[in-house]
Every structure is written in structure tokens, then in C-alpha cells.
Amino acid sequence: MSAPTKVEVAELDDKRAETIETSRGMRSRLRRLRWGLAASGVFLLIVASAVFAPQISPHDPLAVNIRHRLAPPAWMEGGAPQHLLGTDQVGRDLLARIIYGGRVSLVVGAGSVLIAATIGVLFGLGAGYFGGRTDWIIMTGINVMLTFPFVLLALAVIAVLGPSLTNMILVLGVAGWPIYARVIRAETMAIREREFVLAGRALGMSHARIVFRQIAPNLVSVIVVIATLQVAQVIIFESFLSFLGLGIQPPTPAWGNMLGEGRVYMLNSWWIATFPGLAIFLTTLVINLMGNALRDWLDPHLKL
Amino acid sequence: MRNYLARQLVQLVVVVFGISLLAFGILHVLGDPVLLLLPQNAGKAEFERYRHLLGLDRPLYVQYGKFLAGAVRGDFGKSWYADTPAFTLVLERMPPTIYLTLSGLVVALLISLPLGILAALKRHSWVDTLCTGLAVAGQATPLFWLGIMLIIVFAVRFKLLPASGYGTWQNFLLPSFCLGATLAPITMRLVRSGVIEVMNMEFIKTARAKGLAEPAVVIKHAFRNACIPVITVLGLQFGQLLGGAIITETVFAWPGVATLTVDSIRNQDFPVVQCAVILLALLIVGVNLIVDLIVGVIDPRIRT
């Protein structure tokens, strides 16, 4: 198979060069760790605001108020102080909708990453440990899935199943496994050759016991890092599907469908599309920073 | 080289087969075409009649065989909506998508090549820090939101560029920048790490030792070798790039395959969706093959 060589060439990553200049590399790694710590603080705030949305939200996210429709943010001319980020086309408070919208994004992100990681880790372990025909079949599956643009796959499946929260979690979860499988497979192949695995075989351990008790624990940090970074990706995809109207359906607030509605009004009311997008940006940014820091902390030599 | 080519071709056939299976399965296993085609209040007899008419009452493998036999000849059935062959409809929309993808690629290279090389040559300088910052921010920016922001700033506010449409060079500016800017971060990182890796190699020392001027060392010796991982990854990224083009098209109302696909999903026009998905996947597979061949030619290490 040609795939491993391709991947190896692709992974002439900055990590390897970094080790040459260790002291400077260490300094930038420390900086990334510090950024990651700050980012996780922000992330906790975002999670808290989503969890405690009913308590902290200034308004009901579904409350329509036609008289206050399309009000600009409070600091602009014509803005009302009770609507900090302004209102949308039917006068719903944008800040309240953004706070509630975070719930959808986080639930979809966590749910589908759990599904994708479970499938991907199982396939990756199987392919890496057993090799041979199992490996060939799973690798072909990975190649097919990675060739397919993820967006297109998700669109096609949603079109058949119909848009809903559960379907979206399922689709993004089932479509996301190849990334985990590819990395886990490579790591498993390396660990399989280690002496403790050989010792396990010699002691007569079953394959399942070796895979799950001996190999899998070594992969936890890799899985955590990929999963963290994938949450950000999933949140972006979820909002894109909702943006197209194929995800979370209005009036339920989600950052994606708010953006989609805001697009219609962008000629005069820029804030409707801008703030939900900023929320997506901020969330994915802090998750990515956390993921990078985790990678440095848990496994500095990990190439992703 | 012949061996390498043969392996690539086998892989290609397998992947294409897998994609056709996936595209067929999404419609026929996950959903029921007749349910999508007929109104919900249609009688049971009507369903059965249509099922027979479309050959859906036969076993799945027979249907798949028919589908595959048709697909090979470019026959994906007629559009349920427009009464023209799906293949013609999709093919008509292909050029705009390809132009958008290519111009996005050009923009990405224009941004990432100079910045990546500069960052690599002046490691840990402000250029390097700026690049890292840009890359982190770029990876967190949802493409469709960036597109809307670009429209709001350049089309609505300053009225410099058209917000949508197709035909003149002005129409290309916003979409291709939008697409290129999202691919640039990852390319930039790879260029940077590729150049760093190469600059530490022995032949660079040799080139310097024989008295070559630094620009000649960088351009002739370092850059050419750094190209290999960049080309490989650009090839692997092509699927993502096309996925990005899909998102870009929907934001800028670009008359390409993606807009057609999304419209067809809304109209539940499945022959067109199937055809578009398969043709786009074929395009990606084809580009990947070409990239593999190019890399095989310029890097003899991979051929074996």
C-alpha cells in the first residue's frame, strides 16, 4: 500500500526540526502551554455560560418583539441598552440567542467526537494490531472516507435522513472516524513491536487483553489530543450545516442558523451575522489552543 | 516506476469502487427513494407501482449492478426535478467549481509560500510569531463566516467588489481569497517546516561551503527539496480544498457543482446529488493520482 509512505512524507513536521534547537523550542513550547492554560479558562467560561444559560441569559432567546426588531448593538446609534448585541429580524435578543446557541454546538461537538473516537480507535487498533487483510480493508475504508469531502458526505446523508440534532451528531460522528483510525493504526503498529507485547503473548494473554490492557492505555494521550482538536472541527461543520438550513432548525438558536438568517439581513444589519460567527471563532480558537497545549504537554513528539 | 504506477492504479480502482458503494448506499440503504419521491399521502398501491417502475423491488445487489453499469457509461439517470440527464447538469456546473478551486489554490500559495519561507529562515523572529498567530487564527475561522464578513466589508460597506455572481475577474476576488485564506495556514506551516528541515541538511552545508550566494542556496537547493512535502500535502488537501470550495460557493452564490448539489438536496433530486458526489470524488481521486505521480517523479525515494 502506498498510503503509509505518503503520510510519512507529509509528516516532515516542524516538530522534528524543533528538537534541533531545543532551548528555543522549549521556550515556544512553554509559551504555547501558557496560551493553552488561558484558553482553557475561556473555554470553561463558554461551557459555563451554555450550562447556566437560563440563569445568566438577559432575555428569553425565543421571545419575539417586533417593535425592537433589527436594533443595533447597544453602543451604536439607535441601540437599546437592554439589548447589548442588538436584536434580529423579529426582535429576539442576540446575546441571549448566542448564549443558548452554545448549548447546541457543545453538545454536537462532544457527542459526535465521542462516536467518531470510539469507532476510529477500534478500527485503528484492529488494523494496527492484526495487520494483513484486516489492515488492508480498514485502510481502504479510511482512504475512501478521506477522499470524500467530509462536507459533501454529511450533506448527502442529512439530505436522506432529514435534519435534526440527533441525525447531525450521528452523521458527524460516523463520518469523522478515519482521522482517529489513521493515527491510532500507526501508533499501534509501533507499540506492537515492543517487548512488553511480546511478553504478553508469551504469557498466553488473549489478543483482546493485549490490545485493550497493554496497547490502548499507551494511546490515551494521542486520542485526547486528536479528540480535542476535532471538537473544534465538528463545531465548524455543525454550524455550516445549520447555516445551510440542513442542521438545527429555527427557531431553536444555534450559531450556524443565526448566521444563515443574518446573511439575509447583512445589507443593513451586519451584527446579526457577525456575532454568532465571532462566537464560533472564539470557541474553535480556544479549543485549538487547548489542543496544541495538550499535545505539547502529553506527547511533545506527536506528529499531527 | 512501473510497479509504483500499478500499485497506484489498483488503489485508485478500489477507492472509486468504495465511493460508488458509499454514494449508492446513502440513498438506497439509509433512505427509501420512493418515500422521497412521492407525496406522503400517496396510497400503498402507488408506492408499490413506483417501486416496480424504478426497479426498486429487486435485490439491492442487482440495483447496485445496474447503477454501476450506468455510472460507468456516464448515465446516472434523469434528474427528478429538471427532466434532463443528471450527468449533463453536473458537468455543466463543473468548470466554475474547478476555476474557483484553482484560484483558491493560487491565493493560498501566494500567501503561504513567501510567509512560510520567511518564517523558516528567520525562526523565532517577529515574522515567525506573526505567521504562527495568523495560522492559529486562520484555522479557527469558519470559512462561511469569513465569506460573509468579506461581503459585508468589501461589497456592502465600501461597495468595491460584487457580493456574488460569476463571469468577470472581480467576481473571482472575494471567493478565491476566502477559499485561499482558509487553506493558507496549514500550507504555510508545512512550507515552514519543510524549509527548516531541508536547511539543516548536509547538502545545504555543501552548497554554502562551495561558496554559493545565500539566495541561490535557498531557492535552488532548499526550496526545491522543501517542495516535495508541500506538493504531497497539497494533493492530500485537495479534497479539503474542494470541500472548502463547496462552502465558498454556497456563500457567494457561485454557479458551481456545490450550489447545484445543495439545491438538489433541497429539492430531493437524488440522481443529481449522487452524480455530483461521485464526479467530485473522482476529481479528487484523479488529482491525488497525479500528485502521487509527480512526487514519484521528483522524489525517487518514494517509488520503491
Image (cartoon, coloured by chain):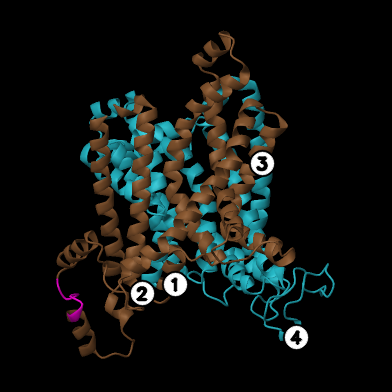
Crowding at dot 2, Cα within 10 Å, few <14 / some 14-19 / many 20+, comes out as many
Amino acid carrying label 4: it is Arg
Which secondary structure lies at badge 1?
helix
Q: Pick whichever of labels 1 and 2 is earlier in the sequence.
A: 1
Q: Which mark is residue A67?
A: 4
Which secondary structure lies at badge 2?
loop
Crowding at dot 3, Cα within 10 Å, few <14 / some 14-19 / many 20+, comes out as few
Check residue B164 for magenta coloring: no
| Hue used for the chain lettered B | brown
Q: Nearer the viewer, mark 1 or mark 3?
A: 1
Name the residue carrying label 1.
B263
Name the residue carrying label 3.
B133
Instruction: Give the chain letter at badge 1.
Output: B
Seen as rendered, the residue at the extreme top is B210
Q: CA distance from mark 3 to mark 4?
A: 43 Å
**Same chain check for tags 1 and 3:** yes
Instruction: Give the chain letter at badge 3.
Output: B
Q: CA distance from mark 1 to mark 2?
A: 8 Å
Q: Which residues are magenta?
A: B53-58
Dominant secondary structure, magenta: loop
Depth check: A94 or A17 in front? Answer: A17
Which secondary structure lies at badge 3?
helix
**Image height check: is B158 above or below A24?**
below
**Image height check: is B220 above or below A78?**
above
Instruction: Give the chain letter at badge 4.
Output: A
Q: CA distance from mark 3 to mark 2?
A: 43 Å
Amino acid carrying label 3: it is Gly
Q: Which mark is residue B23?
A: none
Q: Pick whichever of labels 3 and 2 is earlier in the sequence.
A: 3
**Image height check: is A87 above or below B284?**
below
Depth check: A193 or A98 in front? Answer: A98
> Quick check: can you spot residue A214?
no
